[in-house]
Structure formats: C-alpha cells, structure tokens
Amino acid sequence: MANERDAFLREIEEEVRKERLAKLWDKYGVLAIGAAAAIILTVAGWKWYQSYTQEQAARAGAQFIEITELFTQKKNQDAIQGLEQIAKSGPAGYGQLAKLRLAAQARKDGKADEAIIHYEALASDSSADEILSSFAKLQIAALKVDTAPWTETQNRLNDLVKEESHWKYAARELLGLAAFKAGKYDEARQAFTELMAGSDTPATIRQRAQIVMTLVSRESGEAEKAATKAATEKSATKDEKQKAGDTKQ
C-alpha cells in the first residue's frame, strides 16, 4: 500500500511538472467512472428503446451494435463512418450514443481536438439526456485541463461539482487536480477535503484524494516558505538601501 501511494505521488508530480494532467485523468479519472457510464448508457438505452416501436428499436439497436463491433474487427474507418451517419440522421437516442462512441474512439486514437468536437456536439444537444450531456461537458473539461486557464476550467466544472450533479465526485476530483496544477492550493485543498469527507464518495476517489492531499500540503508549504524567504530578502534589500541613503546624508 505504501509503495502504491508513493508511486502515485511520483506520477502526479511528474505529470503536473510536464503539464499532462489530461494523461493522468485518462488513466485514473475516466477509468474510474467507466463502470458508472456503462450502467447509465444501459439505462438510457432502455429509455430510448421504450420510446420507439419494438420494430424501430430493434432495428436501431441492431445497427448500432453491428457498427460498433467493426472496431473489434479492426475496421475502424468503416465503424467511424457508420457512427457518423447514425449521429447525423439516426434516432435521437442512438445518435447521442454514436457521438459518445465517436468521441471515445477519437480520444483513444490520440485525436483530442476531434474528441472535443464530438463531446461538444453532445453537450450542446438540447434533446440529449442530461446525464450524457453532463458527461460530455466533464470530458471536455478533462481534455482541455492542460491548456485552459484555471478560471476557464473552474467555470466549466461549476455546475458539475454541485450536489445534484450525476458526476459531482469525478468533477470535484478534476477541479482539485486543476487547482493544484495552477498553484491554487486553497481551492485544491477544499476540493479534496470535500471528497474525503463525503460519505458517498466512491472509495477509489476518496483514496486518491487522500494521497493527493499529502502532495498539496507539501507543495503549499514549500510555496509559503519561498514566499516568506522572498519577502525577507526584499525587506533586507530595502533596509540596506535605507542605510546607504542615511550614510550619504
């Protein structure tokens, strides 16, 4: 356990130093909520199934499954073209799933800008299920966390960290990491403290929050020491100049 904790701390330090929080989020954040997303998609799929006739739903569902299975056959381009067609003109529910699957594939292929386009299309879809549109907004914030200013990331996550949000725990974790990267230690500490205190916080997220808090405390302490040292040196320089002026007089 101690070795895992130390390894995680080192990994965070390395990725923050290289400004690659998105990579860290891909490894931990996205995977951590993957199971929840799968459950939500299943429920959402059932809701959409009920909104169509049995024949329409069966046909749309079969087409979607057939197209996504092309990825397992290494026919990625055919799969992407099929999903793009569903996203453009398929039934609303499956169109939303197609956008989500296209974004995930683009992300997997290292095409972050393309993934953002698909997520934004879903996030701005007024007919999209709120759970899916919120998920898309969370992923946009994650993909932009390394390049976006702190205030932009904060604004993107403001609604997602609220108590009623379906993705509040993942959003709070991302907000804490973004604050830590930006040197906003008070905000980072608040985000991770809320995660650790939450009785319903998923165990894996609480454990990571505890680990990162150690790093936040250490980094904020070092920042305070540096600030104190700089202030002391500035004061000493001012005193020396004052003495030099008095001597000349």
Image (spheres, helix red, strand yellow):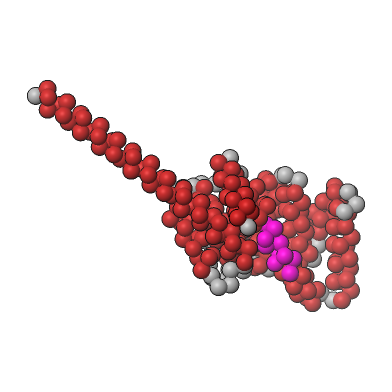
Residue 82 location (% of width, % of height): 85, 54
Q: Nearer the viewer, residue 153 or 35?
A: 35
The quarter of the picture where the C terminus appears is: top left
Residue 128 location (% of width, % of height): 69, 65
Residue 6 location (% of width, % of height): 59, 50
The structure residue drawn at horizontal position 37% and vertical position 44%, both measured from the top left corner, is 225
Q: Is any part of residue 225 visible from this angle?
A: yes
Q: Is any part of residue 155 visible from this angle?
A: no
Please state the extent of the stretch shown in magenta in the rendering: 30-39
Residue 163 location (% of width, % of height): 54, 70
Locate residue 153 relative to residue 249 in the image: left or right. Answer: right
The structure residue drawn at horizontal position 74% and vertical position 69%, both measured from the top left corner, is 39
The structure residue drawn at horizontal position 25% and vertical position 32%, both measured from the top left corner, is 237
Q: Is residue 36 magenta?
A: yes
Q: Quadrant of residue 33?
A: bottom right
Q: Nearer the viewer, residue 41 or 29?
A: 29
The quarter of the picture where the N terminus appears is: bottom right
Locate residue 237 relative to residue 136 in the image: left or right. Answer: left
Q: Nearer the viewer, residue 103 or 24?
A: 24
Q: Quadrant of residue 232?
A: top left
Q: Is residue 249 magenta?
A: no
Locate residue 145 relative to residue 232 in the image: left or right. Answer: right
